Image: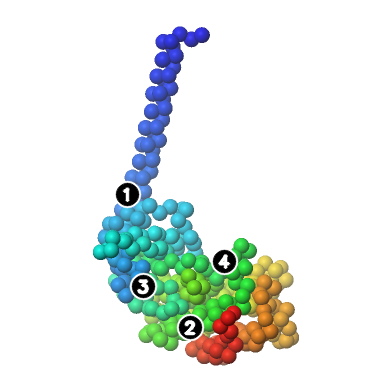
């Protein structure tokens, strides 16, 4: 049996080692935090924060923050806050609690913060002017840009967070597909996307070419209303809105790009129309344009559906998950017809988005059942 003095010595040594290990861990964590803070401080040095006052009610929470407070919140973001990543950057979920008002309540809102991959070369006053223009774009079918933080090497765009995620996830994620099994929901999304694109093409001066229409850039708000996101980013990051030269920077996503884009390198509104046609096929078939089944057979979604339309067997291409009623069949046929026109190989033969909206809204007014 060990002597009491040896037991006490053993306990003392263990206690010292435990305290020392805790101190070492605390020191390493502090060094990690300090390094992260130094990197962010250096990256954001000389930055400019702009919050658009014409935004929705959620902007009040942002407007009550100082740039320092906002950056402090950004420092708290980690990988668990990432909600998306793409060609333009990483997107984080940010919860902002503003200052309490006269009623004692503090406004709280959720935002999507996109960190742009591209940096210093674009971050000049011209770039910021384009962001200010994007902040003026307000439409029920477009995700509003609430503000931005422009710094020499670190650029952030702040959007309203759309609670129901992307059309891509709802269509292709097996755990979410049930939420889009209703045909009226899909038709309403088709109309909403068309309205948003028509606004960008016909009501904005100068016209805004999206350049990256795809299901993952179509988000759904709390009412499952479709909203276009990432509008104008491709133009911002590949030479500005007035660039008409052929560019080697591909702006867009394989499977959605118009065929003429590969020949000319120029983005046009009719290129957006083509991409919209591909999205219509996704809504109708439930398949991605890059679905493995097409690659295995050496074909594409567009080619497969066009062949089905020519053979008058569109019903075989319709998504099995859809709950179709007889009253919906006219709308289904119409959407196949509109998609076929949008996907014409000759851009001059494609309709404008204003024409598409008129067609779809007319049929919606005829067939839409308020109880559905």
Describe the element under mark 4 as helix, strand or loop: helix
Separation of residues labelled 2 and 4 (CA atoms): 21 Å
Residue at 35 percent across and 41 percent down: it is 30
Q: Nearer the viewer, residue 345 or 159?
A: 159
Q: Position of residue 210 (x, y in %)?
A: 46, 77
Residue designated by label 2: 195
Q: Earlier in the sequence, mark 2 or mark 3?
A: 3
Disc number at residue 169? 4
* In the depicted structure, whether residue 25 falls above or below residue 200: above
Across and down, in percent, residue 370 comes to: 56, 83
Disc 2 or disc 1, which is closer to the eye? 2
Mark 3 or 4: in front is 3
Q: Going by the image, does 144 lie left or right of 178?
A: left
Residue at the location (43% across, 22% down)? 14
Q: CA distance from mark 4 to mark 1?
A: 36 Å
Q: Which residue is mark 1?
A: 38
Q: Marks 2/3: CA distance?
A: 20 Å
Q: Secondary structure at mark 3?
A: loop
Is 322 drawn above or below residue 75 in the view shown? below
């Amino acid at each position: 049996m060990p002597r009491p003095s040896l037991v006490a010595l053993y306990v003392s040594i263990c206690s010292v080692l435990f305290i020392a290990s805790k101190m070492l861990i605390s020191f390493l964590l502090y060094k990690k935090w300090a390094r992260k803070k130094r990197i962010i401080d250096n990256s954001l040095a000389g930055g400019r924060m702009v919050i658009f006052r014409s935004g929705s009610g959620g902007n009040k929470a942002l407007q009550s923050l100082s740039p320092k407070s906002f950056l402090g919140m950004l420092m708290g973001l980690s990988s668990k806050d990432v909600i998306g990543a793409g060609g333009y950057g990483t997107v984080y979920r940010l919860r902002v609690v503003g200052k309490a008002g006269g009623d004692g309540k503090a406004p709280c809102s959720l935002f999507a913060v996109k960190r742009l991959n591209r940096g210093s070369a674009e971050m000049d006053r011209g770039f910021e002017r384009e962001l200010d223009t994007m902040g003026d774009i307000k439409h029920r079918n477009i995700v509003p840009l609430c503000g931005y933080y422009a710094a020499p090497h670190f650029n952030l765009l702040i959007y309203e967070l759309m609670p129901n995620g992307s059309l891509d996830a709802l269509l292709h994620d097996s755990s979410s597909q049930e939420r889009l099994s209703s045909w009226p929901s899909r038709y309403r999304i088709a109309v909403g996307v068309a309205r948003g694109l028509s606004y960008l093409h016909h009501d904005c001066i100068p016209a805004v070419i999206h350049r990256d229409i795809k299901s993952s850039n179509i988000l759904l708000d709390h009412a499952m209303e479709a909203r276009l996101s990432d509008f104008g980013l491709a133009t911002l990051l590949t030479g500005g809105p007035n660039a008409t030269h052929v560019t080697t920077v591909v702006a867009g996503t394989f499977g959605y790009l118009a065929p003429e884009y590969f020949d000319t390198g120029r983005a046009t509104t009719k290129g957006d129309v083509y991409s919209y046609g591909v999205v219509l096929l996704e809504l109708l078939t439930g398949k991605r344009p890059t679905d493995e089944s097409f690659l295995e057979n050496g074909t594409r979604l567009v080619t497969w559906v066009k062949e089905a339309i020519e053979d008058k067997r569109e019903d075989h291409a319709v998504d099995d998950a859809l709950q179709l009623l007889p009253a919906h069949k006219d709308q289904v046929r119409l959407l196949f017809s509109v998609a076929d026109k949008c996907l014409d190989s000759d851009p001059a033969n494609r309709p404008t988005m204003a024409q598409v909206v008129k067609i779809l809204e007319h049929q919606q007014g005829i067939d839409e059942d308020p109880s559905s």
